[in-house]
Image: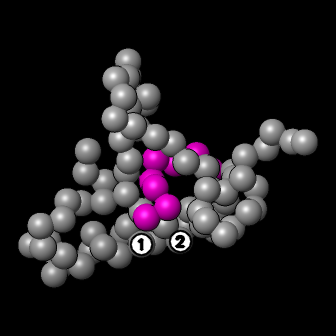
């Protein structure tokens, strides 16, 4: 049994090599717990490079769309 992390994107199963605060839906996720630092305040996920690149592409495409600015949703990186 290995302790190597596995990609957190459902259905992937590849080794996770990148630690990120982006959820599988492409949003930053708070833990809801008291934390002693900013680093501890947000949940961390582990992704393979391909899945992380895909998530980041989705974040940037939503940020760049002008029609998404008035729909009541916060930015994908809002804290």
The percent position of residue 23, horizontal first and vertical second, equals: 46, 55
- Decide: is 4 above or below 33: below
> Horizontal and vertical percent for residue 17?
69, 51
Please say if the residues under marks 2 and 1 sit with CB atoms less than 8 Å apart: yes
What's the mark number on residue 58?
1
Q: Please state the extent of the stretch shown in magenta in the rendering.
A: 18-25
Question: Taking 19 as reference, is 34 left or right?
Answer: left
Pick the quarter of the image with the N terminus: top right
Q: With respect to residue 11, does 30 lie above or below?
A: above
Locate the C terminus and report the quarter of the image it occupies: top left
Quarter-wise, where is residue 25 in the image?
bottom left
Q: Residue at x 43, y 30 (%)?
A: 39
Q: Is residue 7 left or right of residue 65?
A: right
Q: Residue furthest left?
A: 70
Secondary structure of the residue carrying numbered label 1: helix
Residue picked out by circle 2: 54
Which residue lies at the image location 61% right of the left edge and 65% below the top edge?
10
The crowd level at tag 1 (other Cα within 10 Å; few <14, some 14-19, many 20+) is some
21 falls in the magenta region:
yes
Magenta span dominant secondary structure: loop
Q: Nearer the viewer, residue 48 or 73?
A: 73
The location of residue 49, given as percent across then percent down, is 65, 61
Considering the numbered disc 2 on the image, is that residue within a helix, a strand or a loop? helix
Nearest to the observer: residue 62 or residue 33: 33
Magenta span has 19? yes
């Amino acid at each position: 049994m290995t302790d190597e992390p596995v990609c957190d994107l459902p259905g992937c199963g590849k080794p996770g090599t990148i630690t990120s605060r982006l959820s599988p839906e492409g949003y930053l996720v708070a833990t809801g717990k008291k934390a002693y630092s900013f680093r501890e305040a947000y949940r961390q996920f582990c992704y393979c490079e391909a899945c992380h690149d895909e998530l980041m592409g989705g974040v940037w495409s939503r940020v760049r769309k002008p029609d998404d600015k008035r729909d009541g949703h916060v930015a994908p990186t809002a804290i």
